[in-house]
Amino acid sequence: MTLDLTQFHGVFFEESFEALDSMEAALLKLDVGAPDRERINTIFRVAHSIKGGSATFGFSEIASFTHSLETLLDELRSERMQVTKAISNQLLQSVDVMREMLRAVQAQQPLNAQRIADVQFEIELIIAQAPKAPAAAARPAAAAPAPPSPSQNTGVQSAATPAAPPAARDTPPRWHISLRPFPQFYDRGNDPLLMFEELAALGRLEVRVNASTLPSLERIDEKSCYLSWDLMLTGTTDESAVRRVFDWAEGDCEVEIRGEHTATPSAASAPAAREDEPVASTSSALTEVEAREVSGIGETGSIRVGVEKIDELMNSVGELVITQSMLDELARASTEAIPESFREGLEQLARNVREVHESVMRVRMLPISFVFSRFPRMVRDLAQKLGKDVELTLSGESTELDKTVLEKIGDPLVHLVRNSLDHGIEKPQVRIAAGKKPTGALRLHASHRGSNIAVEVSDDGAGLNAERILAKARSRNIVGPQETLSEEQIYSLIFSPGFSTAEQTTDVSGRGVGLDVVRRNVKELGGSVELRSDPGRGARFLITLPLTLAIVDGQSIAVGRENYIVPLSSIIESLQLSQGTLSSIAGRGEVFAFRGDYVPVIRLHEMFGVTRKHESDRGIIVVIEGDGRRAGLLVDELLGQQQVVIKSLDVNFGRVDGVSGATILGDGSVALILDLPGIIRRANTRLNS
Amino acid sequence: MPRKSAPRSKARNEIRLAAECTLAQAADLKSVLVRMASSPACITIDVQATQRIDAASLQLLCAFVRDRKSQGRGVAWRGSTPVVEEAARRLDLHGLMGFAPDGANRQ
């Protein structure tokens, strides 16, 4: 029987893409001229891991390309070559090529052999033409691992890596690793040989085998592992890097990793160490965070679970929520006396269900850094292309949101960032003439706001030119010649399909495709986009999105004999309708005064074609907010508040105007969940027409 | 399916390892080794053609050498390719497999 390695391909691709993201992030932080050696080591290790995995699975083109890249990185880490801007660009380009290769192999598509060969050739040319700097061995202050003293080797039957560069100022950390494979270890595709090679890339490795349980040849099952190993790794590496080597073997062996750091800085070596360190005011805590960022995924204490399994769990929780609502409903509707203990049990169940729901939601939550991480590279490349200097600041990267929302927010943010870079931030000479710093500032910030997440994209560029937008809108008959618009309304025109004020269409933006996509995508997610502009000083886009799309806290409302769900987070207030509250605007519908403003009224029964219970001047107005605007829903009754599981209607019925989905209520009936931004948009369109 | 790995060479006391010695070929390797295990003459293992070897195959070779040694029977290595020896060294199996530190017992 031949081992089917294809079963491991999925994990390999997933881990490789994540590793490439880490590699790219580390490359972007690489300081040309004074690179951090540990960062180069990290980049090298990522390349080495991908090379090893590719070779194991027979992806020879990837292994060959990565080998060239690894050679270049080896030159850099040993300081035989210096990191220059050209090399930094080449490394980033190599990351792109590796990503493309992995994608192609994953999709079983042909590779772009020409591009691969070109980039590989360029890498090899850089290595061949580079003036060689003296090797790191000649630099006494470098933090390279020291070879063990003869006494350390005594009595140890060891397999040691070639001699490491001498003269470290500290004794580097030592990692004692105990590898106890289970019998199925080999049969599950694990080869300690490859693991030890990876470890050897992290530092000096000593290996001691225990073959005491190896049976006689005849009794050996050739697919079972009978050996175990004790290893000692000496090198400036962290535990996560060591642990990552064994990621693939999780469940197939016992691995114990014990660190032993024996830093013994001498009085003489300390000043030398300071001289050699990069000048930076970062605190040690920040350095730790950075190190964690660089080391990337695969930290201890986490497991990798397929999304489909989480979705299954989420569905089950959804059904649990429905069942719990059903029990509540039965208890409420019961004509018989219900024992207090039963009621208490139901309340306990409701609490537990909410806790389970929140726990599962937390499992689905991912930090927005997964999306933000693409921007440093994108901004760097685009700014270079546009001849602009831009400093990108990311904040709130640890803000978590549901994976589904996270996946859909990427494209809108890319559009906004491209828009800011192309139309917002000016070229250095223009900025200097305007009395600004030549380097433009672009900021991405994420934060939680109640049950929503707010993502802000702001820049200190030219801002929006309201006059120009209006003139363009008039010239394209989007706005009538006599029509007057508020500043907010003028700004919102840039979200119209095909609208662009750019004088030149570039391949970055300016075709008028983009901002309308941003608004549409965000609205589809139940969110909104808000725009503020300060002419000459910058613009700010604020995207507000729900944290999750799976379960919402809803208010049940009744119109006639139908029940609807309004997301609770969108309700501002509910008012009893009294005579004279509503005012008619000829041919445009009705409004009512609310907190010093006039808010359009939406008669839900008219919208959905149902017969009301009450006369037209009785009922309740539910004031809602969506898309930055308000409206009042005229309903018959307010029912209870409950968590509802959103079931999509799109699959079976297509998109229904004014409805974002449906849910099953406790009594088994179906209620429609209202799409508030859609409803408000409709009401405002009518009011403004 | 033709078995390509670990063929016995024409010489009766010689085992020639295949280019690929991995888990997929481990059953074949084991059967060849078992057949040769009780041969009273010194067995020569030719590693000249071997380009890739994994821990599972090394484990078999290790057991073979150890079993023969315990019976007072010899094993010699032939071939200049460093693949097998380096792999054994990496796993700390070179001593058990009878590789001298400098590879002096290679024929």
Image (cartoon, coloured by chain):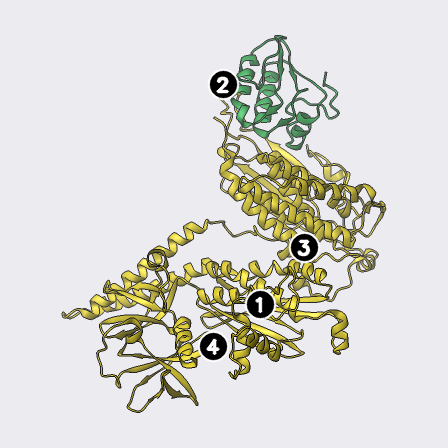
Chain colours: A yellow, B green
The front one of A643 and A435 is: A435
The disc labelled 4 sits on which kind of residue? Answer: Gly
Disc number at residue A26? 3
Gap between marks 2 and 3 measured at Cα: 49 Å
Q: Are marks 3 and 1 in contact (CB under 8 Å)?
A: no
* Element assignment for label 2: loop
Residue A24 in view in this figure? yes
Q: Within the image, what quadrant is residue B64 found in?
A: top right
Residue A84 is situated, as x and y percent measured from the top left of the image, at 79, 53
Mark with earlier residue (1, 4): 1
Q: Within the image, what quadrant is residue A456 found in?
A: bottom right
The front one of A170 and B57 is: B57
Q: Which is in the foreground here, disc 2 or disc 3?
A: 2
* Element assignment for label 1: loop
Task: Say which chain tag 4 marks.
Answer: A
Gap between marks 3 and 4 measured at Cα: 39 Å
Quarter the C terminus of chain A occupies: bottom left
Mark with earlier residue (3, 4): 3
Circle 1 is placed at which residue position? A396
- Extreme left residue here? A336
Task: Say which chain tag 2 marks.
Answer: B
The disc labelled 1 sits on which kind of residue? Answer: Gly
Q: Within the image, what quadrant is residue A355 found in?
A: bottom left
Depicted A241 relative to depicted A615: above or below:
above
Circle 4 is placed at which residue position? A628
Circle 2 is placed at which residue position? B1
* Element assignment for label 4: loop
Residue A376 is situated, as x and y percent measured from the top left of the image, at 65, 60
Mark with earlier residue (3, 1): 3
